[in-house]
Image (cartoon, coloured by chain):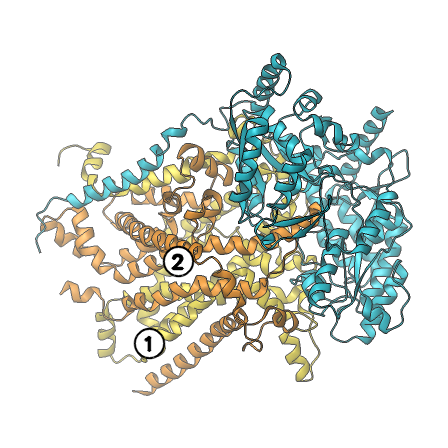
Chain colours: A yellow, B orange, C cyan
Amino acid sequence: MNGQGFWGDVRKYRTLLLMLTPAVLFFILFAYVPMAGIVLAFKQFNYDGGIFGSPWNGFDNFRFFFDSGNAWMVTRNTALYNIAFILVNNLLQIFAAILLFEVAGKWFRKITQTVLFLPYFISWVVVGAIAYNLFNYDVGTVNAVLKAVGMEPIDIYNTAAYWPVILVAVAAWKTLGYGTVMYLAAITSIDTEMYEAAEIDGANVFQRIMRITVPNLFPTVIILFLLAVGNIFRGDFGMYYNMVGNNGLLFSSTDVIDTFVFRSLTTSNEIGMSAAAGFYQSVLGFATIMLANYAVRKYDKERALF
Amino acid sequence: MKTDRLLLAGIGYTALTVLAVFCLFPFILVVSSSLTQESTIIENGYQLFPSAFSTEAYRLLFDYPAQMLKAYGITIGVTAIGTVAGLFLTAMTAYVLARKDFKWRGKFSFFFFFTTLFSGGLVPWYLLIVNYLHLKDTFVVLILPMLLNVFYMIVMKSFMSGIPEAITESAKIDGAGDFLIFRRLILPLSKPALATIGLFIALGYWNDWYNALLFVQKDDLMPLQYYLYRMLGNMDGMRKAMMQSGAVVNMDLPTESLKMAMTIVATGPIMLAYPFIQRYFVRGLTIGSVKG
Amino acid sequence: MTFKRKPVSLVLALVLAMATLLSACGGGNKSSSSPSASESASPSATASASASGQASPSGGADTPEEVKLKMLLVGGKPADYDAVFTELNKLLKAKINATVEAEFLDWADWSQKYPLKFAANEDFDIAYTANWAFYNDQALKGGFLELTDDLLSKYAPKTWEAMPKVSWEQAKVNGKLYMVPNNNQEVTDKAVLIREDLRKKYNLPAVNSPETFANYLKTLAQNEKGILPFQAKAADGWKWHELDQILLEQQNEWNLVDYNIPLAYKLDDASGKVFNVYDTPEFKQLLTYYKDLSDNKAWSRNVVSNKNDQWQDIKAGKAASYAQNLGTVAANLAEMRRDKPDVELAIADLTPDKKKIGAISTQNGLAIHANSKHVERALMLIDLLQNDKEIHDLTMYGIVGKNYEPVGDNKYKAGPNAANYTGFSNWGWNSPLNRTDASYPQEASDMGNTWLQKVYHFPLETFVFDDSKVKNEVANVGNVMLRYAIPLEYGLVKDLDKGQADLIKQLKAAGIDKVQQELQSQIDAFLAAAK
């Protein structure tokens, strides 16, 4: 080994660095170069000036958001929904993955796994339409059933309180197959020797699951958690918009940053203002992920994202 | 001794069946509605069994069979090329980040991850692709911008971190270079992860219509999902525009059943391919067997 | 296993990866000259300079070299585009030594793509534009070329002659013109489509006022199970009750300056005093009217979440009325007569004696791209599209015998392939040369003609609000309207007084006062200048 310090390391890792090169170039070109566009959040965009030549306008583009009096509500909603999604979705996916792995019937396993994936393919537009068919007051299926059994119909579309439950359930339903595959792959990668050892020790299946499968899923859980945390201030616009639409009665419990910004900007079409909202989400997400990553690092350096 | 297995089987079959029913039920609704007469849907809503059978929606979709087949061809081509290239690059990058002896892996991970937090937005992105890379109306533009995804890279890295270091170490002693280790040892050991991420990448390409929306104008390059998106969006968008501009256009299209038929047309092929990918998730593809 | 080989395949993989990236970067030497948005400082200035520079010496419509124009239209590309535009280009070649090629931005995604085309400074000469398609915004951002009287009178002389002065004035943004608006005289008042057969069934008086309409709705709600008396369109961001244009605006003879803000003035108020409509006794009274209807089940409790198409609901017999502009209502009436002749519909004007307002000209139009290199020829093309009978017929209705059959001089019948040439924004060059559909219901054209005769002209007719100084406030006000005004108007809020007070309070917080001040000062300045 000749050479010390930085250049020595470069020599030492030259193959690894070479292997990273395509990805590094890719992200420089497709992510870091356009990132310069963040300046638009602080500019009054016009075509003559373009991105860099347009006049600065300070924090003016942020004003619509913070002056609205809704900034806190929609930020809180966005974060709470995402926290609920992270918890519910992952628990359900892990549960389904473990069961899929454990049940014996080969055909049952294959068919179930395929069926669990079906909701992923139904677009939010269609999901929204089906939900309206189920939930609407006058002729919805839910109320038809309630009336048939002699109960009072419920006015779902005019009652904000139902919606957190509905949205969390729908999100879990839609992502079930996708997430299950990921956890199933993680379980499949667990060394079978461990299971054999457990069997010899006389552990029952539940003990085996709790002592071997679940702990071995932990790294995957943490990684997925960290990845989700960075986006905790971003809402899946397609979902909220197609499920809730412009129904103001539900906004107190369904409005997230993305829908709020969309509604505010449909008429003004102002590039700078949407850039400002995006920047706000980025900064919050960045702060949160730094904290979360720091916490994970404290607990186990190997498990952290970076 | 066997009671625990019975209990688990009981829970497993019951719970999975319940979940499966929840997932299947709406899909049947979609299939059935796609085969129902439009007027019946409007009068009675979606039904589990088509009470007034009609293939009108599918006929409409395949009105221009050449266009539809071409769209399928583009989508299949994009998905195939994109998945192979993307999966290889993702795995290669992930492997380097998973190497515990690589000093800068934290820094590089951060470099990649940062791009998921901040982005420049639509305008600079569009300017880059159209004015600087000149990729508008090219086949490449449907593949290149989605080639790598940080999320997949990091999940892949996390899978690869589970592979014992001893394997890399012993290969190194045998004189293998890093790339050879990756290609000959790590890739075969990561089959479940490759299958999973490969599936995700494929789904991403299969379902993408946004790149086409922004960058494809030529009919010859239109992928399936964008073709469908446009068909539906044109109906909705036109209605809205007509009201605002005062113009009147007469059109009578089965939007409801069409929406449903589109779901089926767009889902079918990838659902058919899915069982083949599943064989990589079976038990037994383990590290232990290779180590021995 | 042997590990002695050099990692040739790695190098190969890298080369491949690099090649992909590089080919991407270098792929387009051909257009390396195309300027980036940031480089091409003030294209409008250069374009107009060159335009007038070239124009002055020759004077007339001198067209020595053939040019190819590009036109940006909104809507799906019609199936018979090639046939029609080949024909068009033959005519254009002879008349102005130019050809034109249109690019279509689909309805599905035009609102996202349209601004990007400008931001990337793509190559096109003419663009469809309209007040609802960001006309003001694009003009203020420098996307369009300013059209001077000189340019217009020289290169679009027929249009310059034919266009009413009011139409030009309405199209001005901050006193400058950026659009050749369509020349289409019509009234924007909304009408209501009702089930005439059901009205007769219950012996109800003719529907021609808010009271008779309420009576109609309530009778149906009571007696016709399974039919929604009134249906609203699927929620799409519209910030008012569907009947507000009729019952609030037309009924009170107000003019809402911009449907994104609740500010209006009285049509006959010469001083142009602006007020907040939510804070008026008229609005309060209307709320009671709506609440009564809502309590009597005149519309669905889930009306704000509605996802169904209102017309399809009526056609299917699930709904019994809706409000829309006269043209749409009339087309639907004709459709019902064709498809379900046993169902009798009627068009009802709920405000027959009130003042009518002419449609604002910027509802449709064409603009010249700020960096167009063929300004004169583009204007000549617009002139022909709007005012040359042969070209107008061809571009509006397609090819005779295929897409349409002319009926006399001003009517047409749909041809066998009518569907192959329709559905895009050729409305941009609507003009008095437009033909009307021969199947258009007689009562609708009668109603339209009566309305036209009653058009009321007022000083603020050509006033357009420039909201660029209060963008933040306008965004917030719109949000408040969606969230608080709509549920209140559809009768979903129990306590009307409290609901109205809440709405006004939220509007104040959103900055309505600042918007009102800005609007008032612009109106005052406008009126002062007009004197």
Comparing B234 with B277, the one in front is: B234
A302, above or below C104, in the image? below
Q: Residues within 10 Å of mark 2 (few under 14, many from 20)?
A: some
Indicate the secondary structure of the residue bearing disc 2: helix
Location of residue B96 in the rendering, given as x and y in whole percent from the top left corner: 26, 47
Residue receiving disc 1: A102
Chain label for disc 1: A
Quadrant where the image shows the N terminus of chain C: bottom left
Are marks 2 and 1 in one subunit? no
Q: Nearer the viewer, residue C185 or B4?
A: C185
Q: Would residue A64 be visible to someone looking at this image?
A: no
Q: Disc 1 marks which amino acid?
A: Glu
Using the image as rendered, state which of residue C464 and residue C389 is in the foreground. Answer: C389
Chain letter for the residue marked with disc 2 in the picture: B
The circle drawn on residue B203 is 2
The residue lying furthest to the top in this view is: C57
Q: Residues within 10 Å of mark 1 (few under 14, many from 20)?
A: some
Q: Nearer the viewer, mark 2 or mark 1?
A: 2
- In the image, C304: left or right of C277? left
Q: Which mark is residue A13?
A: none
Q: CA distance from mark 2 to mark 1?
A: 26 Å
